[in-house]
Each structure stands twice: as structure tokens, then as C-alpha cells.
Image (tube, rainbow, N blue to C red):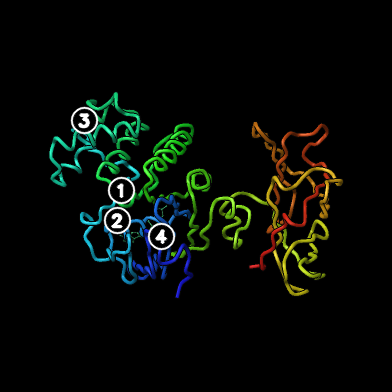
Amino acid sequence: GGVSVGVGAAGHLAVSGATKRFGAALVLDDLSIAVAKGEFVSLLGPSGCGKTTLLRCVAGLLRPDAGRILVGGADITTLPAHRRNVGVVFQNYALFPHLTVAENIGFGLRAQGVAKREAAPRIAEALRLVRMEAHADKAITALSGGQQQRVAVARALVVRPSLLLLDEPFSALDRKLRETMQVELKQLLREVGITAIFVTHDQEEALVVSDRIAVMNAGRIEQLADPAALYGRPSSLYVLDFVGQSTRLSGRVVETASNEIAIDTALGRIWAPGSFLRGSPVIVAVRPEAVTLGSAQDGAANHITARVAEISFLGSRTQLHLDLVEPDRGVVELPRLPDGIAPGASVPLSFRVADAMVFPAP
Ligand code: ATP
């Protein structure tokens, strides 16, 4: 069986053992996930890992070859899409260009046979939620990308779905607008209290919007955790590399103490938490902001010296890219660049034992 992750059978959405093949390609591999009521979970992973396929199975647009999908305890695995009470927001919004904003939002209500008298206040409420009250009678084509995005969300929410599915909803927006919309969506969904699944390949976006993130790898869930845990305690090198940056050094365990090990690397000996056998080949990693310049950091037991290859000024902080030999690589983040550090310089660096993460070498 696959890794079972989530909150167990009590999840509002529970996918268990979902498997999907397209020809010879195994796109969902015995995947299970449970999402609690009101939770906002992102599916994060590289192109082709199966995110959209999982979303389409939940929406009822695809039938898994094996496995079950439950919403609110009811098995919907074989239910057609239009009977699932699931709202979907697609990448391209799929709005009707010949209808007004209000008509687009009301479309699903009409399809459900909701009377005009009841539909009007619900459309108004949906417009209010996405702050589009002033645009009700506008043509879709007269709206900006961000406004169209909001209409698509309102249209999905107006039918009061038990689940909201969003497939890369911000991919058509520029970076600045994307960031605004991410925060806006998070606030909106909290206000509505709806359970939502959000597909993205953008790790920063996943960190911003999600209560929890499911990192997918080849049709499976590699790790499901809240953003801080995913970043701070990645369960594998795959997650470490996919979420955030790090300095990662290959080495070999040379000493073992009670709950700590010493690893010899190209930059010297590093102590880390963990229990690996002496002689084990490992990768030791540390996040960029956990490293400080200088050798006298309070409580830091790890001191290394590295050569700076390149310096990137990022506005609120500066990154030092370290000169290391593949497969090792390094990036360190400083609040500001001290005088006298230029590419080619050797710099003393230190970090705490607790901030070192160890993984078995691949
Ligand atoms: P992306 O970010 O590119 O959308 P994804 O993680 O959402 O990636 P999926 O769209 O789920 O990935 O696709 C996973 C794999 O399944 C891909 O290799 C894709 O080519 C294949 N695939 C998806 N849908 C079909 C289909 N209807 N027929 C055949 N192959 C498909």
C-alpha cells in the first residue's frame, strides 16, 4: 500500500489508494490523502507529477482506475461531475465571454434550477465576497486578468460547494498581481470556511496560501505538512530541494554520539542531529538564513570556511553563493552585505547543530 497521510478517515475529503494510468504511464500511484473541513491544502510538485490528474479525479472529470474518493463520508468515486457539489476554478477561468459578470456568476445557479428571486441575493453576496459589486453588469472582456480571476472564484463559490478545487488559478497573472491575489484568496476562503484544494508548481505560492502542502513526486505524496514544518523539517532530499533553498554538502559519518553525529564534508567537520551508522554516506543541509557570517555565533557549534562564488542583492537581503564542487552546492542569506566581501573571498560561516539536516545519500 501507499503512504497514508492526513487526518485519517475523519477528513472532509478522503482519497484512498487512488491509482490512474494513461497507457503505460502510472500517473497516480496508490495515492491517499485526507483533508479536514475548512482546510486549504496545496498540491505542489513539478510538471507531470499528477497534480491536475488528482484534482480531476476529485472533480469527477476523470475516473481513477482504483481507489476511493469520499466527501463528507459519502463515496463519490463513481458520481458524475455535475452531481458532486464541487466548485472548480481552472487555469484559464473558462468564463463565458458573451455573458456579463453577474450572468457568469449566476450561471451555475440557473443550471441548478434556483429561482431568480433566490439567485439575486446570492449573486450579490458572491460579488461582495470577491469585491466586484461595482462590476456586476460589465462584460467579461472589459475586465482585467485579476478581476476575471475573482469572477471565476465567485462563480465557483455561489453554488455553495462542499469543496473548492483550484488548478493553478493565478498562472496567467503577473507576479505582483499574483502575490496580491494569493493573500486575497486566502482571506476569502477563511471567511467562507470552505475546504479547498489548490494545485500549483510554485513553491512560494504554496507556502503563502496553504494550511498544509502535499508535495507530490511521480504520482505519490512525498510529504504532507504545514508550510513551516515542510520547510524546516523536509522528510527527504526531494522535498528539501523542491521547497526553498539550502546549502547541501555530501559527506560521511565519522563519529556518533547519543543524538548527534559528526560528518566530514568538503568544508570540514559538521555536527548534526540524527542517528546514522558510522561510515554512512549522507547529505547534510542547512537553510540559507540559518547560517551567519563569522565564527563566534552564540551557541553555534558548526564553523566552516567557504569561498564566495557570487553575490546576489535581493533588496531585503543578500545571498552569497558558495564556490563548491558538484553535487555540493551552497547559498547563504544575510540581512545585509558586510564591507569587504566580494566574489573570491573566503568567509567564515557558522550555524547551530539543530539547524543541520541529514539525509541518506541518494
Ligand atoms: P502540470 O503542472 O504540467 O499540469 P501535473 O502535475 O498537473 O503537471 P498531470 O497534468 O496530472 O501533471 O499529468 C501527469 C502525467 O499524465 C503527464 O505526463 C501527462 O502527460 C499525463 N496525462 C495527463 N492527462 C492525460 C490524458 N488525458 N491522456 C494521456 N496522458 C495524460
Q: Which residue is mark 1?
A: 88
Where is residue 282 drawn, in percent x and y? 71, 66
Q: Is residue 24 above or below residue 142?
A: below
Label 4 beta carbon less than 8 Å to ligand 1: yes
**Would residue 241 be found to the left or right of residue 343 on screen?**
left
Lower sequence index among marks 3 and 4:
4
Q: Which three-letter amino acid code belongs to the residue tagged 2? A: Ala
Lower sequence index among marks 2 and 1:
2
- Callout 4: helix, strand or loop? loop
- Callout 1: helix, strand or loop? strand
CA distance for labels 4 and 2:
14 Å
Question: In the image, which disc is placed on residue 100?
Answer: 3
* Label 2 CA crowd tier, 10 Å (few <14, some 14–19, many 20+): many
Lower sequence index among marks 4 and 2:
4
At 37% across and 69% down in the image, what residue appears?
Answer: 19
Q: Which three-letter amino acid code belongs to the residue tagged 3? A: Thr
Q: Which residue is mark 4?
A: 50
